Image (cartoon, rainbow, N blue to C red):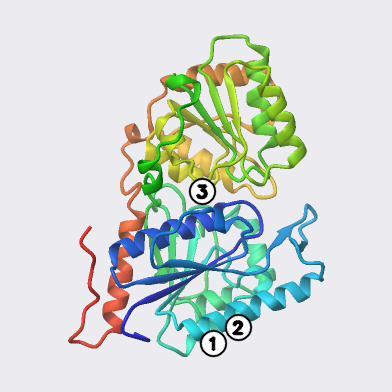
């Protein structure tokens, strides 16, 4: 161990949406609750990371943000410099932070080499130290053929074989395998560890200051497109169902997300003003109270929304996107097959009667817990257990990492 107290550095691949940041934050928050001397530092390019609550001993380093354009290219989020300069700054910050922080574990989220290879230098520098190098993968990445072509192009496979010590898959093995159908280099499969999904809890701030109840505490359906950047069609589809008013529906609370285009957000807000049973919120960093109080949920099928659906155990309708990746569609298909939720394909958009029928049936669906899937939400506990093992391996024989009593 590099010092008397354990340290973990997490790289959050942030170019679009909230998924990477919220997954990394959930892991960090859980770990500092389990290890009472642990410090966790998150490297993130998210422009709204400062909007979130962090526990003591969790902090972040904000690197210059980038966004992915529709043509697949990246561009700086705010700086008026070219993308190569931005990536050079990001790479330098990442490598120097790792050098000074001296983490005992370095967790890289989703992108094995980071955005355009920006983490490769840091991985190579840390490989010769006592730092354990971990790649964290969500349960679904993309179609196997598409992912293999992408990883071949990015030259990812040598890093999986030669640099990473472990690969954690944040889901149960029985539902999704992110590397299914991949021809992995020798020894890589042995590095895989399936954790289960990451359970979400109510934030302490939300318990102390409860969110206002929409619709005077009447039952409601929560509609969440996650970050919102690609959720315009889904939200429009739901609103069309309420505007058509072809059958009685529970009221709907729609949380648009911080990355929904401003023009679309303004239009949805204006349309909601003409609907007595639809309320719109632009963004909240604490969506958990609304999830907990909702009767049912409509979501797109991103990883974090899926973890929240499972954690708060609500009947769910998924409307997954299919571009630029089929990740959400694959997750939704597997989840429906496992009996966890229902799916309404986005290909059927914008049929208001079809959506209205699905919304009317939604509150009567069984919650995910009724499917009785093994190790569904054990991810944080499995990660904590493995982190404790790693720390113990790194400590002298007469020392042990002290676990907090929680």
Work out whether residue 276 can be spotted.
Answer: yes
Left or right? Give the position of 404 relative to 72. left
Q: Which mark is residue 276?
A: none
At x 52%, y 39%, the residue is: 332
Q: Secondary structure at mark 3?
A: helix
Query: Percent x, y for residue 135?
Result: 48, 69
At 34% from the left edge and 85% from the top edge, which residue is drawn?
1
- Quickly name the residue at label 3: 303
Mark 2 sits on what residue?
A: 121
Q: Are marks 1 and 2 in contact (CB under 8 Å)?
A: yes
- In this view, the residue in front, 283 or 116, is 283
Decide: is 360 above or below 19.
above
Whether residue 154 sits left or right of residue 164 in the image: it is right
Please tell me in which quadrant of the rendered image residue 141 appears.
bottom right
User: Observer-nearest residue: 373 or 190?
Assistant: 373
- The residue that disc 1 covers is 125
Q: Which residue occupies 36% across, 43% down?
A: 208
Q: Residue at x 65, y 32 (%)?
A: 234
Closer-to-camera residue (295/324): 295
Return the x and y of residue 365 as percentages of the image width and height.
42, 23
Q: Residues within 10 Å of mark 2 (few under 14, many from 20)?
A: some
205 sits left or right of 250 in the view? left
CA distance separating discs 1 and 2 = 6 Å
Secondary element type, mark 2: helix
């Amino acid at each position: 161990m590099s010092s008397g107290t354990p340290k973990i550095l997490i790289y959050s691949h942030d170019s679009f949406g909230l998924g990477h940041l919220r997954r990394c934050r959930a892991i960090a928050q859980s770990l500092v609750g389990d290890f009472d001397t642990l410090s966790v530092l998150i490297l993130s390019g998210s422009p709204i990371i400062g909007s979130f609550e962090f526990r003591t001993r969790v902090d972040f380093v904000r690197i210059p943000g980038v966004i992915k354009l529709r043509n697949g290219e990246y561009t700086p989020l705010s700086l008026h410099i070219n993308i190569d300069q931005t990536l050079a700054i990001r790479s330098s910050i990442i490598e120097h932070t790792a050098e000074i922080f001296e983490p005992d574990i370095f967790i890289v989220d989703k992108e094995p080499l980071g955005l355009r290879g920006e983490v490769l230098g840091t991985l190579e520098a840390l490989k010769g130290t006592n730092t354990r190098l971990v790649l964290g993968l969500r349960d679904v990445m993309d179609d196997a053929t598409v992912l293999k072509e992408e990883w071949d192009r990015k030259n990812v496979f040598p890093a999986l074989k030669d640099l990473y010590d472990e690969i954690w898959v944040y889901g149960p093995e029985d539902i999704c395998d992110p590397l299914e159908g991949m021809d992995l280099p020798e020894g890589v499969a042995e590095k895989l560890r399936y954790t289960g999904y990451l359970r979400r809890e109510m934030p302490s701030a939300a318990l102390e200051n409860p969110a206002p109840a929409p619709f005077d505490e009447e039952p409601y359906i929560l509609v969440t497109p996650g970050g919102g950047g690609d959720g315009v069609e889904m939200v429009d589809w739901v609103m069309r169902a309420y505007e058509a008013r072809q059958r009685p529906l529970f009221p709907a609370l729609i949380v648009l997300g911080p990355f929904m285009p401003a023009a679309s957000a303004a239009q949805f807000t204006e349309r909601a003003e003409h609907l007595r049973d639809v309320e719109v919120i632009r963004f909240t960093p604490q969506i958990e109270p609304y999830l907990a109080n909702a009767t049912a949920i409509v979501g797109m099928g991103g990883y974090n929304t899926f973890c929240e659906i499972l954690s708060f155990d609500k009947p769910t309708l998924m409307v997954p996107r299919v571009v630029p990746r089929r990740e959400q569609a694959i997750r939704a298909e597997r989840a429906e097959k496992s009996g966890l939720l229902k799916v309404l394909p986005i290909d059927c958009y914008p049929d208001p009667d079809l959506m209205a029928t699905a919304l009317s049936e939604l509150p009567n669906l069984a919650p995910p817990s009724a499917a009785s899937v093994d190790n569904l939400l054990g991810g944080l506990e499995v990660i904590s257990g493995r982190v404790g093992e790693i720390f113990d391996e790194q400590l002298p024989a007469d020392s042990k990492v002290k676990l907090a009593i929680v």
